[in-house]
Amino acid sequence: MVAYLFALPFVASFALFMLYPLLSSLIMSFTDFTSRDISTPFGVDFVGLEQYAALFQDAQFTRSLLNTLYFVGVGIPLTMAVAMVLAVALNNGITRFRTAFRVGFYAPVITSIVAIAVVWRFILQPDGLLNIVLGGVGIQGPDWLNDPAWAMPAMILMAVWRNMGTLMIIFLAGLQTIPQDVMEAAEVDGAGAWRRFTRITLPLMRPTMLLGAILLSVGFLQFFEEPFVMTKGGPLSSTLSISYFTYNEFGFGNYATASAASYILFIAIALLSILQFRFFKTKA
């Protein structure tokens, strides 16, 4: 009985501030609730799946869905590849100032995303640092944030730089759990560095890579701050994400539409996690 009393404050706060809003938004997604219905919440009509069907007929939502899939499909593999290279280098190749490199690569993770977005907005300007560097090797850089073809790649570049630190630390921890006697035995048998990496390191790193992929998926599918600060979803909706679309619909007072869009995003996260579990499943 005493244990239940101690747990009661948490259960009550969870039910009030988490469970109740969650269930309310789920129910709302099956209605036509808007800002005009706030004074008469029981006068709304249940419309079933009409909100969900209407979303897939909305050009803005389908564009935001494709943009999000593009961001996830390119950003997650690229971030994992860069993080793996850095983790291997820190685990094997870099011996001096290893701690300094770890701190340097991880620093963007603990920096405010708004501050990072503001700095990168200046870096990606037509006369910004990136185009200056490209100009030094004879390449004329585009107007990254105002060109529909380059705005999303610019977002992905920034996201990879910001998120690789977290994955690098996770992968580094995984690499350090691999038995060294296994690696030494493979080296004695004549396996080269690449063969040891592909046949020993990567298979043994599958659980670690699964963890990293799921953590990235949750963040990448919900990306919002980057386009909000840097492009406002433009140009021509080329950086409009599902989260940004939901934010706009909520601001317009279309609460039921925003709720339905958020649950579609939830389903996308769940499906991607299931696919990743299957892909990184450890073979017996």
Image: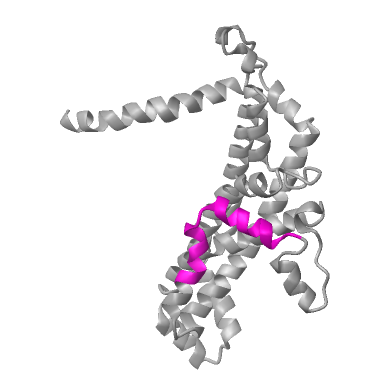
The percent coordinates of residue 162 (x first, y second) are 57, 60
Q: From this viewpoint, is residue 284 visible?
A: no
At 63% from the left and 50% from the top, the residue drawn is: 226
The quadrant in which residue 61 appears is top right
Q: Is residue 160 above or below residue 32?
A: below
Judge from the rendering whether residue 40 lies leftward or rightward of residue 241; answer left or right.
Answer: left
Quarter of the N terminus within the rendering? top left
Judge from the rendering whether residue 19 lies leftward or rightward of residue 191; answer left or right.
Answer: left
Outermost residue to the front = 127
At 59% from the left and 76% from the top, the residue drawn is: 198
At 67% from the left and 50% from the top, the residue drawn is: 230
Magenta-drawn stretch contains 146: no
The percent coordinates of residue 7 (x first, y second) are 25, 32
Q: Is residue 163 above or below residue 82?
A: above
The percent coordinates of residue 150 (x first, y second) are 78, 57
Residue range (magenta): 103-125
